[in-house]
Amino acid sequence: MGKDERVNTFNRARQDAPTMLRTKAYDRFQRPLQEGDVVLLLGKGDIFWRVQKVAPSMHPSAPAGMVELSLVAVFVTGVQGGEAIPDLIKVRDVSEVQQPPQVEES
């Protein structure tokens, strides 16, 4: 390493940078997340979630390198057939739904 290489802090910072990109999201084992992956989000009911979208946060007050994950979960429960379920209300009929609901951009 020559004198100029030691003095050039920009070049040294680039060499010392981690290999993970700041515009991507990684799990606890440093595996990259992408759309369609299934993840377990600990502390949120320990439910399996499907990654619907991974995108950099465009919110003006978000810190640099912030990435937004859009997660979708399917909740399976058992109910008694042939009876009304008091805690369940249908919001849309299948004929009203043309495509799955999209996560709104924040």
Image (spheres, rainbow, N blue to C red):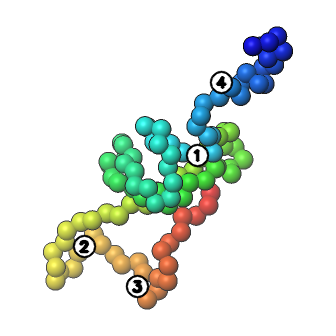
Residue 86: mark in rendering: 2
Say if 17 sits above or below 27 in the image.
above
Camera-side residue of 106 and 6: 6
Residue at x-position 35% and y-position 64%: 74
Element class at badge 4:
helix
Q: Looking at the image, do the residues carrying marks 2 and 3 touch, with CB atoms under 8 Å apart?
A: no
Residue at x-position 46% and y-position 60%: 36
User: What amino acid does circle 3 point to?
Assistant: Val
Lower position in the chain sequence, tag 4 or tag 2: 4
Residue at x-position 23% and y-position 75%: 85
Q: Looking at the image, do the residues carrying marks 3 and 1 touch, with CB atoms under 8 Å apart?
A: no
According to the picture, the residue beneath numbered tag 1 turns out to be 24
Camera-side residue of 57 and 17: 17
Lower position in the chain sequence, tag 4 or tag 1: 4
Q: Nearer the viewer, mark 3 or mark 1?
A: 1
Q: Position of residue 53 (x, y in %)?
A: 54, 58
Position of 87 with respect to 13 (left or right) is left
Position of 43 with respect to 99 (left or right) is left
Element class at badge 2:
loop
Q: Residues within 10 Å of mark 4 (few under 14, many from 20)?
A: few
Residue 94: mark in rendering: 3
Residue at x-position 43% and y-position 37%: 29
User: What amino acid does circle 1 point to?
Assistant: Lys
Quadrant of the rendering where the C terminus is positioned:
bottom right
Separation (CA) of disc 3 from disc 1: 35 Å
